[in-house]
Image (tube, grey):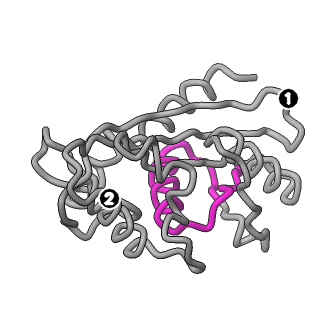
Amino acid sequence: MRKLVIASNNPGKLREFQFLLQPLGIEVLTQAQLGIEEIEEPHHTFIENALVKARHVSRLSGLPALADDSGICVDALNGAPGVLSARYAGEDPKSDQHNNEKLLDAMKNMADRRAHYYCVLVLLHYADDPQPLIAEGEWHGEIALQPGGDGGFGYDPLFWLPEFGKTSAQLEREQKHAISHRGKALRALLEKLKTSP
């Protein structure tokens, strides 16, 4: 596989994928570069949304497609924001800051701060590929009482890692990729790629 289209217009995700896939010599294109519009993500599970996005981009580009669906799941909120993580504040355009503010507000006075990031990756060799490569990763932490750091994106300023004594937004990029949900999922996917036909 020489070319791959990433089924996302999220600049943070695109930077992460380009960084992580660069060593493989795979040319990473974005759906925006090919003039492909984003598709609705109507499902209640990450895997269903990732499949929809990958099929859409592969069908319109004629190339292999990699889709990610990911988000943050908070135990005390029954897994919310979950699949709605990017649109949690209900705004268009999406706003990381407003999403973070809404999450902090929802967790006011809550003692249980446990949360985890979840990522599922779906790679299709072609649009009707009956055997998509699927990999997932989780990253456990807590929701901080206030934002910290200016790295990363999404909920990174609120994602507190007790073992490091800092938020995800305060980690170095290489350190984050080594332990993040997306990094774990991509490494699992790369292992599958090595053995796939």
Q: In percent of the image, x 84 and y 58: which residue is there?
A: 61
Image quadrant of residue 133? top right
Q: Position of residue 150 (x, y in %)?
A: 25, 70
Foreground tag (1 vs 2) = 2
Q: Nearer the viewer, residue 159 or 152?
A: 159
Q: Amino acid at mark 1?
A: Pro
* Magenta-tinted stretch: 1-28
Query: Looking at the image, is 147 positioned above or below residue 53?
Result: below
Does 100 sit left or right of 34 as displayed?
Answer: left
Residue with the most extreme front position = 109
Q: Position of residue 55 (x, y in %)?
A: 81, 47
Q: In percent of the image, x 57 and y 50: which residue is there?
A: 83
Q: In percent of the image, x 66 and y 45: which residue is there?
A: 44
Q: Position of residue 22 (x, y in %)?
A: 50, 51
**N-term mark: 1 or 2:** 1
Under circle 1, the secondary element is loop
Does 96 sit left or right of 174 as displayed?
Answer: right
Residue with the most extreme bottom position = 93
Which residue does the numbered mark 1 point to in the structure image? Answer: 130
* Label annotation for residue 161: none
Which residue does the numbered mark 2 point to in the structure image? Answer: 156
Q: In percent of the image, x 65 and y 56: which residue is there?
A: 6
Q: Amino acid at mark 2?
A: Asp
Q: Is residue 2 magenta?
A: yes
